[in-house]
């Protein structure tokens, strides 16, 4: 029997849970209430698997975040009218009373220099930037009239992942593990990985637990160095010796518990055992060297590197082992045009080559393993990019666009969403959503729905208010549900 | 029910209000915009009025009360709360409401809005247990619950508990032994003496600071995307000093809220106001300035409200509060107090945001004082010496030749009609170093006019490239130099202090332009002498553009009122002596006879044998002094703008949706009246918070102190004393403590002393499984506190018992071990301060954890693992989790491994000759007690096993003991040391070790 379960069975009282989550018994009670609604569970480990409000379509989520805001008009949102009017002055009606991050004055419209075609049974529009997305079009739902309230990176990312544009609220993955627990107690329930540079502008708040207990925060795993911070034994310490000292430690802790009866000591003993197991299980799952050459090739992954491709492959390995929420952050999508890498022609081609291949491979791989049906994949940025050239770089050879909160595209696949489906339309120049607009709060509500939750009922009491991921907004986008 | 602990009579605040608040007030509360059926249940008079469907509440008549019918019905059209609300009232709660109506439906003002009064002494069957007045109420409650207090903790257990609570560090075995013996002889007196000793320790301030830093969201970086370094540690040191000096808490708060508004504020009082500048500041390009400025003001409201009112006013930012009677207007009236700072939404990219203040450390203050005295003494000596009026022959010629060697470039406009010098002519080069000088004479006003400007003032001031360049202005008789990439957020702006330039006379200014062109590298000279400066902005983030210079104009505002001439640049940094000489050489025809005589005298003194040595000494000291001043640490502080910025209600909380105009004010009816004659500014606000009859401040503060000791507050929701918060477990204890705290002069040390000496606190934390099951969180206080140590305490203890702890108090934050690659691929890749973790040296690795550099977006991972908050916002309580990642930190983190090895060294050197005494030695250091026989057996057995293992693998032993920067004692065998380190690590990882028992 699993050591934690064992410990819990020996102490099946609420007090154990209360003490293990510390002072947050308000939360514990909320969790308790939550449990009362779902099927009863036999233990009080905060990360033990739990049933959601109703039967879930998706059991787990892989969220692929492209930090910076991919240029939707050059990938999914085809605008021939904008191409026709390329280099014309941007209409006043559009600029009036608005502020853009890096553009003042009257910018020039910019049609996409890329070639678009329709793909798959649903006739999804895609550009030549995403040759591999084209091949998996039948698995995708595209939300083409996404919009947000924020036009700077950090607040937009926080709004997208925590429901609020400032730090301090629990993140999407924290809500998911708070609601569902996780299925493999030897691994963290919520894992984040970062590629190509730096963490998202929103910082660790994008995977933080805010005011809910920190057991629900994302654990950052790395494909280089310690797979989880401090997981590696120090030089000179063998596993056997660690085991031997841990046995003694367990013995001493147990004696103290026998003597004084502190419930938290029982939890401590169990957590130490878990830690010991994690030291093996995490490096194992993070080691892709034993993947087949075909699999490595499909993703474009190379053992020992830290790349988005490796992270996609790792995401599959993690969800396969029962991790609830895997959140990948890839840097380098802020296509302002301030350098050749931010050019929507060659720059985007290069960036996408390292992106759409592993994402397509991930979709195929999950499908092949029978995991796609109950694993939700989401791909996208925190906002879109303007239909005009960015002000600062308007005179350069490089083509870039400014931040744009009104229109962007999010791609979803698997986990209970339709395949070969596009939802929402923007106007002929990509200035505004005109049909089936989806706000980021609606996206959150939909993801929670797919996980089996009524987003309005998955709440946590803090400072007298019941908080939720969707703040006081959010509507489930029923139309995309399979 | 709020507590569910007692079988007393119904009380509205405790039993009924929470049910109504939770389920009814959302639609039938004080927010008129969301009120349904015009029914309001939070005010008795309104709740008793007739409505369309009858009377909601008829006192004494449950059968006529619509509210009960609605609660009981299953008809979804009538049911309350409505099924779609996700709210549900339990049968037990309905029964309470029924009983309450039957008893006449009495209302009470919410308990926390009524000023605390001491409760009458309770009747006790045996009062001898109580040591402090509040112990009686604790005992009364236990008696009502048919429980008995737990036995008294052993003296050693109490001492360790109190030591962690008052100093954050464990007592040493020597201290424990001494105390045990003292306690056995002197009893109570020994406890009091021990408490006094702990309170007198400078560690007390460090311990108390820890929690206040959380509340004050202290950090060493600005947050957001760039998250570069800021300098606020002088404020942190002020907090530590204040606690150590037992500054009365009302002054502690007043100085932080309004130190700058006190009559003739001291530098320390101004420094204290940094409290309200600890919020995050965004330097991301392209943000809307006003949006973030509003955010900072809102953060001050949030922090102040949580810290002192225990109320979450944040809800009222967008709409009237749903639960607590705080309106949106109340919120923005509070907002108005903090709205008058001359600050920017975008600031702090590379240094402190404005306004800021030079804040010398105590050592620097002493050093400056010493220098000033020395300079004054030298001046007196020099003045007493005779100076030969003629000086050495040919002096002027010699100096002129020296000056010429420095290759000055005289810059005259090409066209007399346009006073413009081309950038390439001026040849400013900060990398190489440039000295610029210019002469001017103001005709009448010296208020604010440009002397020289190469600053781009074209375009929109909100635009990205606005204000690139350099500029020299005369402002209120002082010289101001600007080097800017974007004005003013990314600019260095420094202004002279005491130049006192009046109209009608010629003056020369010289500027050292070098290095990063920040405040520390720029020097200003007036009439040949370097003058002290104050830093107004210190944020230039790269080289300013080299633009054409306009003489006497900035291209926009009024031109210089007077004459500007003699513009020169030197392609090097002139020595102070050379600047002086250049001035003297150029001054002859410009300055008046008396001025000239004085200048001659000053020059001659440097070249005449009788005075030269003293004068050189004086000059050197002066230059040193100014360099010291330029390099003083700065701190961001509060500073009122001369004209109050109009505040508005912001509709939906939107920064630009101005609604009704509002003036600064507080919810007087709800909470407390405005004190007579108090000014309507932050100082008045402080007086309002701290008036003796304020219902919240003292309660909130003592409750937080209590939570520091017991792990949970008397009001468990330490951050919420509003109607949604929890009813206090012991209202009488809370009110007695609050009353005594205020009436006793806000005496912080006095408070802690009384509690640690109380019978409640002195109970053992060991308890029967039944008691744990009945009261898992110890809300009844039938036992002593048992709480896992904080992240800081766990690490500090490891450092202390291993002998590594560096005891220095205060100073800049330090960087102890952190995984080397942690920032790699995470932190923004730009040359901003704090984008690298430059591992500390020597003692910096072993300082107490509250000095660890706090980077908001990537806080130290080991501290986060043990539940330190990220300090993005005010946080009044920490979660206390128990996770596997904590084990990994204790086992594998470099610092803990090094502490283990050093503790191992101590075992070998100080722990006696055999394994049993060595393990006992370490065990006692870490837990404060002797191991029991069977524990000792486990320890020695494991020690032997480790020794055997490492004997077989000596290379592994050698590797293990190399972890950490300190060098292992070469006199010790690697195998012995590794084995001892292994045992020590185990001991440091014990549940008991990392817990306050």
Image: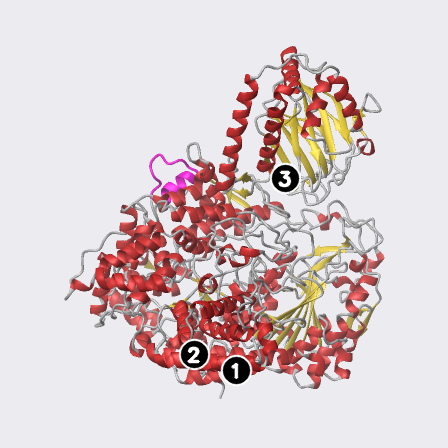
Of residues A189 and B836, the one drawn nearer to the viewer in this rendering: B836
Image vertical order of residue A359 relative to residue B417, above or below: below
Q: Quadrant of residue B63?
A: bottom left
Q: Are marks 2 and 3 on the same chain?
A: yes
Mark 3 crowdedness (10 Å alpha carbons): few <14, some 14-19, many ≥20: some
The Cα–Cα distance between marks 1 and 3, rounded to whole angstroms, is 59 Å
Q: Are marks 1 and 3 on the same chain?
A: yes
> Could you say which disc has been placed on residue B520 in the image?
3
Q: Secondary structure at mark 3?
A: loop
Q: Secondary structure at mark 1?
A: helix
Q: Residue furthest top?
A: B593
Of residues A135 and A247, the one drawn nearer to the viewer in this rendering: A247
Q: Count every numbered label the image shows and give the total.
A: 3
Examine the structure image and report whether residue B680 is included in the region drawn in magenta: yes
Image vertical order of residue B108 relative to residue B266, above or below: below
Image vertical order of residue B175 relative to residue B630, above or below: below
- Residue A211, visible in the rendered structure: yes
The Cα–Cα distance between marks 2 and 3, rounded to whole angstroms, is 56 Å
Identify the magenta region: B673-689
């Amino acid at each position: 029997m699993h050591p934690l379960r064992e410990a819990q069975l020996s102490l099946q009282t609420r007090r154990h849970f209360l003490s293990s989550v510390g002072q947050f018994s308000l939360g514990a009670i909320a969790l308790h209430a939550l449990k009362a609604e779902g099927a009863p569970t036999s233990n009080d480990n905060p990360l033990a698997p739990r049933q959601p409000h109703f039967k879930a379509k998706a059991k787990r989520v892989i969220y692929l975040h492209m930090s910076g805001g991919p240029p939707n008009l050059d990938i999914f949102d085809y605008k021939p009218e904008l191409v026709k009017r390329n280099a014309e002055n941007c209409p006043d009606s559009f600029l009036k009373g608005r502020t853009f991050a890096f553009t003042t004055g009257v910018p020039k419209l910019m049609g996409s220099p890329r070639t678009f075609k329709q793909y798959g049974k649903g006739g999804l529009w895609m550009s030549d930037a995403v040759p591999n997305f084209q091949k998996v079009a039948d698995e995708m739902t595209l939300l083409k009239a996404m919009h947000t309230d924020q036009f700077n990176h950090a607040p937009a990312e926080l709004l997208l992942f925590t429901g609020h544009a400032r730090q301090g609220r629990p993140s999407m993955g924290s809500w998911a593990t708070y609601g569902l627990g996780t299925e493999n107690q030897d691994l963290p329930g919520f894992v984040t990985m970062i590629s190509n540079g730096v963490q998202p502008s929103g910082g660790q708040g994008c995977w933080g637990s805010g005011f809910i207990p920190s057991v629900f925060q994302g654990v950052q795993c790395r494909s280089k160095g310690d797979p989880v911070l401090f997981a590696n034994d120090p030089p000179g310490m063998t596993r056997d010796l660690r085991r031997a000292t841990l046995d003694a430690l367990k013995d001493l802790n147990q004696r103290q518990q026998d003597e004084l009866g502190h419930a938290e000591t029982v939890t401590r003993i169990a957590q130490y055992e878990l830690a010991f197991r994690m030291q093996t299980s995490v490096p194992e799952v993070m080691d892709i060297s034993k993947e087949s050459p075909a699999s490595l090739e499909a993703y474009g992954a190379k053992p020992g590197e830290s790349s988005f491709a490796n992270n996609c492959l790792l995401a599959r390995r993690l969800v396969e082992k029962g991790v609830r929420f895997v959140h990948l952050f890839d840097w380098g999508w802020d296509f302002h045009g301030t350098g050749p890498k931010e050019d929507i022609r060659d720059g985007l081609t290069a960036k996408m080559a390292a992106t759409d291949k592993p994402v397509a491979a991930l979709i195929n791989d999950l499908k092949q393993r029978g995991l796609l049906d109950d694993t939700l994949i989401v791909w996208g940025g925190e906002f879109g990019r303007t239909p005009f050239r960015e002000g600062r770089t308007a005179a350069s050879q490089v083509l870039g666009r400014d931040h744009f909160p009104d229109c962007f595209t999010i791609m979803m696949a698997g986990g209970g969403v339709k395949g070969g489906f596009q939802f929402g339309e923007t106007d002929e120049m990509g200035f505004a959503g005109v049909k089936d607009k989806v706000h980021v709060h609606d996206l959150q509500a939909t993801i929670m729905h797919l996980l089996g939750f009524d987003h309005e009922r998955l709440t946590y009491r803090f400072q007298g208010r019941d908080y939720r991921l969707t703040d006081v907004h959010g509507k489930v986008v029923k139309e995309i549900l399979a | 029910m709020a507590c569910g602990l007692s079988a007393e009579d119904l009380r509205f605040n405790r039993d009924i209000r929470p049910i109504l608040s939770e389920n009814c007030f959302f639609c039938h509360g004080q927010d008129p915009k969301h009120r349904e059926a015009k029914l309001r249940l939070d005010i008795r008079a309104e709740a008793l009025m007739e409505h369309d469907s009858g009377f909601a509440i008829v006192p004494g008549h449950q059968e006529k009360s619509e509210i009960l019918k609605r609660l009981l019905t299953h008809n979804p059209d009538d049911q309350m709360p409505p099924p779609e609300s996700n709210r549900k009232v339990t049968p037990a709660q309905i029964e309470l409401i029924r009983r309450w109506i039957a008893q006449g439906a009495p209302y009470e003002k919410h308990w926390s809005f009524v000023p605390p009064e001491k409760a009458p002494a309770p009747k006790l069957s045996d009062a001898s247990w109580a040591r402090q007045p509040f112990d009686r109420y604790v005992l009364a409650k236990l008696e009502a619950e048919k429980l008995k207090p737990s036995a008294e903790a052993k003296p050693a257990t109490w001492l360790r508990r109190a030591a962690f609570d008052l100093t954050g560090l464990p007592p040493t075995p020597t201290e424990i032994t001494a105390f045990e013996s003292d306690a056995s002889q002197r009893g109570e007196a020994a406890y009091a003496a021990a408490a006094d000793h702990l309170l007198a320790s400078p560690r007390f301030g460090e311990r108390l600071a820890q929690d206040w830093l959380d509340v004050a969201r202290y950090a060493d970086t600005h947050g957001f995307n760039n998250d570069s370094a800021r300098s606020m540690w002088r404020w942190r040191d002020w907090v530590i000093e204040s606690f150590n000096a037992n500054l009365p808490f009302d002054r502690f708060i007043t100085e932080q809220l309004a130190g700058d508004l006190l009559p003739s504020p001291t530098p320390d009082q101004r420094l204290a106001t940094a409290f309200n500048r600890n919020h995050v500041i965004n330097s991301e390009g392209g943000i809307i300035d006003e949006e973030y400025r509003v955010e900072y003001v809102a953060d001050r409201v949030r922090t102040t409200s949580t810290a002192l009112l225990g109320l979450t006013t944040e809800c009222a930012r967008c709409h009237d509060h749903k639960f607590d009677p705080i309106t949106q207007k109340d919120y923005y009236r509070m907002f108005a107090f903090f709205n008058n700072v001359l600050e920017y939404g975008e600031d702090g990219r590379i240094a402190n945001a404005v306004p800021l203040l030079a804040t010398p450390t105590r050592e620097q203050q002493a050093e400056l004082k010493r220098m000033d005295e020395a300079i004054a003494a030298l001046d007196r000596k020099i003045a007493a010496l005779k100076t030969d009026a003629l000086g050495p022959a040919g002096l002027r010629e010699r100096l002129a030749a020296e000056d010429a060697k420095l290759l000055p470039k005289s810059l005259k406009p090409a066209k007399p009609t346009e006073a413009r010098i081309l950038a390439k002519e001026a040849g400013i080069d900060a990398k190489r170093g440039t000295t610029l000088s210019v002469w001017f004479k103001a005709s009448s006003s010296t208020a604010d006019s440009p002397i020289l400007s190469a600053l781009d003032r074209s375009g929109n001031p909100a635009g990205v490239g606005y204000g690139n360049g350099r500029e020299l202005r005369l402002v209120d008789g002082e010289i101001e130099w600007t080097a800017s990439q974007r004005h003013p957020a990314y600019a260095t702006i420094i202004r002279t202090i005491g130049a006192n330039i009046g109209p009608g006379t010629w003056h020369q200014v010289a500027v050292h332009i070098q290095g990063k062109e920040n405040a520390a590298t720029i020097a200003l000279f007036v009439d040949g002498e370097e003058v002290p400066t104050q830093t107004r902005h210190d944020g230039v983030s790269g080289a300013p553009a080299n633009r054409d210079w306009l003489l006497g104009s900035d291209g926009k505002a009024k031109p210089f009122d007077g004459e500007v001439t003699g513009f020169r640049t030197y392609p090097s940094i002139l020595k102070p002596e050379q600047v002086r000489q250049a001035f003297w050489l150029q001054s002859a025809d410009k300055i008046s006879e008396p001025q000239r005589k004085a200048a001659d005298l000053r020059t001659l003194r440097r070249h005449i044998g009788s005075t030269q040595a003293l004068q050189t000494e004086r000059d050197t000291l002066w230059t040193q002094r100014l360099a010291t001043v330029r390099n003083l640490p700065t701190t961001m502080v509060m500073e009122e703008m001369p004209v109050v910025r109009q505040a508005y209600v912001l509709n939906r909380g939107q920064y630009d949706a101005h609604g009704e105009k509002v003036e600064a004010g507080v919810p007087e009816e709800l909470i407390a009246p405005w004190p007579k004659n108090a000014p309507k500014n932050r100082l008045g606000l402080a007086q309002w918070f701290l008036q003796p009859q304020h219902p919240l401040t003292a309660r909130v503060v003592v409750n937080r102190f209590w939570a520091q000791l017991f792990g949970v507050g008397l009001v468990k929701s330490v951050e919420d004393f509003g109607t949604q918060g929890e009813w206090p477990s012991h209202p009488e204890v809370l009110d007695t403590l609050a009353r005594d705290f205020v009436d006793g002069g806000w005496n912080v040390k006095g408070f802690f002393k009384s509690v640690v000496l109380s019978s409640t606190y002195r109970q053992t934390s060991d308890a029967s499984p039944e008691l744990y099951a009945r009261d898992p969180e110890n809300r009844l206080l039938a036992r002593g506190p048992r709480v896992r140590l904080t992240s800081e305490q766990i690490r500090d203890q490891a450092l202390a018992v291993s002998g590594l702890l560096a005891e220095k108090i205060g100073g800049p934050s330090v960087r102890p071990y952190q995984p080397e690659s942690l920032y790699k691929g995470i932190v923004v890749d730009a040359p901003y301060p704090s984008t690298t973790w430059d591992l500390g040296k020597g003692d910096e690795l072993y300082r107490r954890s509250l000095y660890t550099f706090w980077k908001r977006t990537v806080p130290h991972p080991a501290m986060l693992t043990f539940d330190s908050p990220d300090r993005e916002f005010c946080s009044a309580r920490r979660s206390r989790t128990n996770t596997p990642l904590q084990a990994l930190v204790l086992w594998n983190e470099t610092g803990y491994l090094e502490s283990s090895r050093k503790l191992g060294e101590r075992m070998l050197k100080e722990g006696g000759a055999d394994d049993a005494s060595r393990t006992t030695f370490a065990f006692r250091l870490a837990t404060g007690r002797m191991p029991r026989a069977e524990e000792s057996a486990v320890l020695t057995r494991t020690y032997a096993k480790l020794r055997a293992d490492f004997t077989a693998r000596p290379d592994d032993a050698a590797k293990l003991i190399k972890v950490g920067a300190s060098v292992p004692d070469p006199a010790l065998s690697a195998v012995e040391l590794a084995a001892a380190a292994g045992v020590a690590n185990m001991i440091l990882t014990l549940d008991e070790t990392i817990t306050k028992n």
